[in-house]
Image: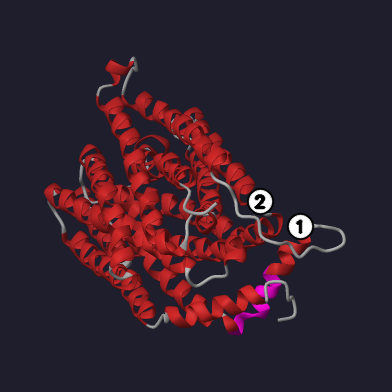
Amino acid sequence: MKDNKKGIWGWAMYDWANSAFATTVMAGFFPVFFKQYWSSGADVNTSTALLGFGNAIASLVVAIMAPILGAIADKASAKKKFLIFFAYLGVLMTAALYMVAEGNWMWAIFIYAMGIIGFSGANVFYDSLLPSVVSEEKIDYVSGLGFAMGYLGGGLLFLVNVLMTQMPEAFGLANAGEAVRWSFLTVALWWGGFTLFTIFWVEETKYPKVTTKTGNFITEGFGQLKATFGKIRHMKTIFLFLSAYWLYIDGVDTIIRMAVDYGMSIGFDSSDLIKALLITQFVGFPAAWIFGKLGETWSVRKSIFIAIGVYIGVTIWGVQMTQKIEFYILAIVIGLVQGGIQALSRSYYSRLIPKSQAGEFYGFYNMLGKFAAIIGPALMGLVGLIVRRILMPVAPTPEQVVEIGHLASRWGIGSILILFIAGGILFYFVDDEKGRAEAKYLEAHAGDISA
């Protein structure tokens, strides 16, 4: 039943659960531990490239399979089942990071990539369950609530994990390195434990099925995907929005995943960067909720434009910053808009799609997001390597190596700027009224394979 408080909170609790992976692992400790422990001895630009390419490969796998699995989940009314499978794949891989030995960067990247596949794959079905728990009138607010809960939950565990690394002896641990490894286990327990609220409290809406004689949901899922491409002429607004989203969310995801690595590459201390991430988390908690209310009472489109504009300013500032206080200020600014742009993009998209095909269409949504995350980290790493190769003298001094490494990293983060600008331009041309009309057509022809 929609707008049921228990269902809404059960849905939002998954963001509380899985955000521990996004904060402690993806944004926080994995980049630091990868650079200092698993790839120790490599230069900063090489380790950045390795991390960027690892993110990119994992995102590519999710991007390819997301719409197919979404279509199958629609036909089988199995969004929750797919969410559970991918969530606990991510939980298992996160726990497995504890076992990776020093210098073994290949296993670290592989297990981390599998964890991202679990995390991102589950999000396809988590997003697609949103229309099942809430009506359109409240969807902006509830989408914002999910991200707000994610910032709070992920931030609280991240705070505990940071204290573990700063005061390991208080937790019965030998050193900060052991504390980081134990932090991966706490994330697995947190993620796996709180996901139970979603499993037991969220009821998936069951739509009428158009089944074949064999009842083969896999075949029917591929058939639905084929039918969607057959209706592509009726999906112009959806694809225009997805193109815009693909570009601007690329910048958002890249900053989330690569900010700590970038800060270390230009000479900031890892402990300062971790503190900045904590600031982003706790600023993001009320900000995401406020953005959800803005979308409900003011304008979703204007709120998304504001967030894009802020990210353009953040990127320009980030290229030039030299003081750690600037990183803290940027952390506050990012916290104000990060959850908002994610929450409102998700709820805005729900207005453009047929509800009975939410799994498939949120599969496309997440596919584009993951294809964007392929380009962003890879672009950042590649630009840094190219600039380094061009500027590095034949026999560089140690000082030149450091200076050119810093400059290459700044060029890398600066390359993300164009994605925010291009995404904002495309989003300007999205007509949501036209999109609603297209969604009604797709809903009416959901079972018409030849449409």
- Checking the image for residue 246, the label placed there is none
Return the residue at label 1. 217
Circle 1 packing at 10 Å, graded few (<14), some (14-19), many (20+), is many
Say what secondary structure mark 1 lies in: helix
User: Was residue 94 drawn as part of the magenta stretch in this picture?
Assistant: no
The quarter of the image holding the C terminus is: bottom right
What is the CA distance from the residue labelled 2 to the residue labelled 1?
10 Å
User: Was residue 228 drawn as part of the magenta stretch in this picture?
Assistant: yes
Q: Which residue is rendered at x = 24% and y = 43% of the image?
A: 273
Circle 2 packing at 10 Å, graded few (<14), some (14-19), many (20+), is some
- x, y (%) of residue 377? 40, 58
Q: Which residue is rendered at x = 55% and y = 75% of the image?
A: 439
Type of amino acid at the residue the image marks with label 1: Phe
Q: Nearer the viewer, residue 323 or 154?
A: 154
Left or right position of 307 against 208: left
Say what secondary structure mark 2 lies in: loop
**Quarter-of-image position of residue 290:** bottom left
- x, y (%) of residue 101? 47, 29
Return the residue at label 2. 78
In the displayed structure, would residue 87 be above or below residue 377? above
**Quarter-of-image position of residue 426:** bottom left
Left or right position of 115 against 222: left
Q: Which residue is rendered at x = 42% and y = 68% of the image?
A: 348
Q: Nearer the viewer, residue 114 or 265?
A: 114
**Quarter-of-image position of residue 388:** bottom left
Q: Cβ–Cβ below 8 Å for labels 2 and 1?
A: yes
Q: How many marks?
A: 2
Extreme residue toward the right, this view: 213
State whether residue 379 appears in this view.
no
Is the stretch drawn in magenta largely helix, strand or loop? helix
Q: Which residue is rendered at x = 33% and y = 55% of the image?
A: 339
Type of amino acid at the residue the image marks with label 2: Ala
